[in-house]
Image: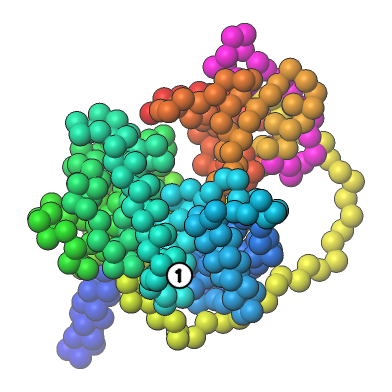
């Protein structure tokens, strides 16, 4: 190799090394991204309060995709339903379904949706929404307690999301509210609620990053700076051999945090490239079906994060999403499979083989078991889909949840509406504490 060739080789190696020090997600095949976005379109036709999901709008606005007039109608429906139900009172002749107000997490995501449309919340109605979210946080702070022995009712994930939403709208949060989240990160066992610790740590890191960049809570600045670094370090340490951070579904939010890092490092760049490879394999396997997870992944594939909502670019060009066209499908005779449903957290234990159509969800299995008798369950709606609140009349307590496992001990990463059991599997519902 000549001197010039050697120089160019070394220069190329240096540039590649320099690029690998940042958390950058190289461009993904546009067809895969389009297919991902197309899965959101049917959900954008569901405009009732029960189905509205502000995260869908945020994910699209931070992506390279758009849904045109459907997107505008979705934001209008969000404003109409959320403000009516949150600000009330509802008149007696109003037939709307506002008996249950949007939760703290839903309100926080709604504020993110407004920022994604380059709106700052303001005016009398806006001030009332801000007051509502601050009231939620104060209530959660009281649940944690002055000695930090308690836990927020909605969890630290939504606690961090609430702080992030207020920060993005340039609304100050009291030091004692921020301090509870700081303490939880500094003593991170407080964040380990079930299997969502990576998501929670990432959301806390995004909240602190926003506070740091916005110059809020100056008296807590040293602790906030350390907490930002701590959350990134903890997320990096959670990377699996396959490349995911925690699991495939917590990886998008984890990458959002790591992509905000101002401190290049070889380990950071390598970890993000490894995660990108793992995500690409998951996209090709069509692992992402849940709309909340898709809405967190789309910004990452466009090199965006929630922190970009501090100064959103509402003029950035985006490609119009076209609904997927289904080609002629071959007609197959329906195939039945057998799934064993097991509940060992009750006395006497329950176990029953359930026959169900292939391709059915776990929720379909639960419904069939209930129809057959001897089994009951209850669910609660959330932005990520329905989750179990009770099984056989046994309710999950404040620090308990019904865990879904594939026998013997493999926790399911998807919820009851998304997971599709295979023939011969045994699914256990287990009441566990966190």
Q: Pick the residue in front: 15 or 30.
A: 30
In the figure, is residue 165 to the left or right of 327? left
Q: Name the residue under label 1.
A: 114
Q: Where is residue 341 in the image (x, y as percent from the top left)?
A: 67, 25
Range of residues picked out in magenta: 342-361
Residue 360 colored in magenta in the image: yes
Above or below for 139 versus 122? above
* Residue 163 vertical placement versus 1 (above, below): above
Asked whether residue 264 is in view, the answer is no
Image quarter of residue 407 = top right
Q: Position of residue 281 (x, y in %)?
A: 52, 58
Q: In which quarter of the image is the N terminus?
A: bottom left
The residue at the point 55 percent across, 76 percent down is: 65
Residue 140 lies, with reference to residue 4, above or below; the image says above
As drawn, the residue found furthest toward the bottom would be: 4
Q: Quadrant of the C terminus?
A: top left
Question: Residue at the location (52% across, 70% down)?
Answer: 60
Q: At numbered mark 1, what does the secondary structure look like: helix, strand or loop?
A: helix
């Amino acid at each position: 190799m000549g001197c010039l060739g050697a120089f160019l080789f070394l220069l190329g190696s240096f540039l590649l090394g320099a690029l690998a020090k940042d958390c950058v997600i190289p461009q993904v095949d546009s067809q895969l991204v389009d297919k991902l976005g197309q899965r959101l379109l049917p959900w954008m036709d569901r405009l009732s309060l029960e189905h509205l999901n502000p995260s869908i709008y945020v994910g699209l606005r931070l992506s390279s995709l758009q849904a045109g007039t459907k997107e505008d109608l979705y934001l209008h429906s969000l404003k109409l339903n959320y403000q009516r139900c949150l600000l009330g009172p509802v008149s007696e002749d109003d037939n709307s379904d506002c008996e249950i107000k949007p939760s703290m997490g839903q309100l926080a995501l709604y504020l993110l949706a407004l920022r994604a449309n380059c709106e700052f919340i303001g005016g009398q109605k806006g001030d009332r929404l801000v007051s509502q979210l601050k009231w939620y946080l104060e209530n959660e702070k009281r649940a944690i307690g002055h000695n930090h022995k308690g836990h927020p009712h909605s969890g630290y994930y939504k606690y961090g999301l609430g702080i992030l939403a207020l920060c993005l709208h340039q609304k100050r949060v009291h030091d004692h509210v921020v301090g509870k989240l700081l303490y939880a990160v500094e003593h991170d066992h407080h964040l380990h609620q079930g299997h969502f610790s990576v998501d929670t740590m990432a959301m806390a890191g995004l909240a602190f990053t926003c506070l740091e960049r916005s110059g809020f809570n100056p008296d807590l600045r040293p602790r906030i700076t350390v907490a930002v670094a701590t959350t990134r370090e903890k997320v990096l340490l959670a990377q699996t051999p396959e490349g995911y951070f925690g699991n495939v579904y917590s990886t998008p939010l984890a990458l959002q945090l790591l992509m905000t890092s101002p401190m290049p490092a070889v380990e950071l760049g390598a970890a993000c490239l490894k995660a990108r490879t793992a995500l690409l394999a998951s996209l090709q396997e069509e692992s992402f079906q849940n709309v909340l997870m898709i809405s967190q992944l789309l910004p990452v594939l466009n090199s965006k994060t929630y922190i970009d909502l501090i100064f959103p670019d509402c003029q950035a060009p985006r490609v119009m999403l076209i609904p997927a066209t289904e080609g002629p499908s071959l007609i197959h005779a329906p195939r039945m499979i057998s799934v064993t449903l097991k509940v060992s957290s009750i006395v006497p234990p329950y176990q029953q083989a359930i026959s169900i159509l292939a391709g059915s969800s776990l929720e379909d299995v639960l419904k069939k078991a209930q129809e057959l008798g001897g089994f009951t369950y209850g669910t609660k709606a959330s932005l990520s889909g329905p989750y179990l609140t009770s099984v056989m009349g046994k309710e999950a307590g404040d620090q308990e949840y019904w865990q879904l496992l594939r026998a013997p001990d493999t926790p399911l990463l998807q919820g009851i509406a998304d997971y599709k059991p295979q023939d011969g599997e045994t699914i256990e519902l287990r009441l566990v504490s966190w």
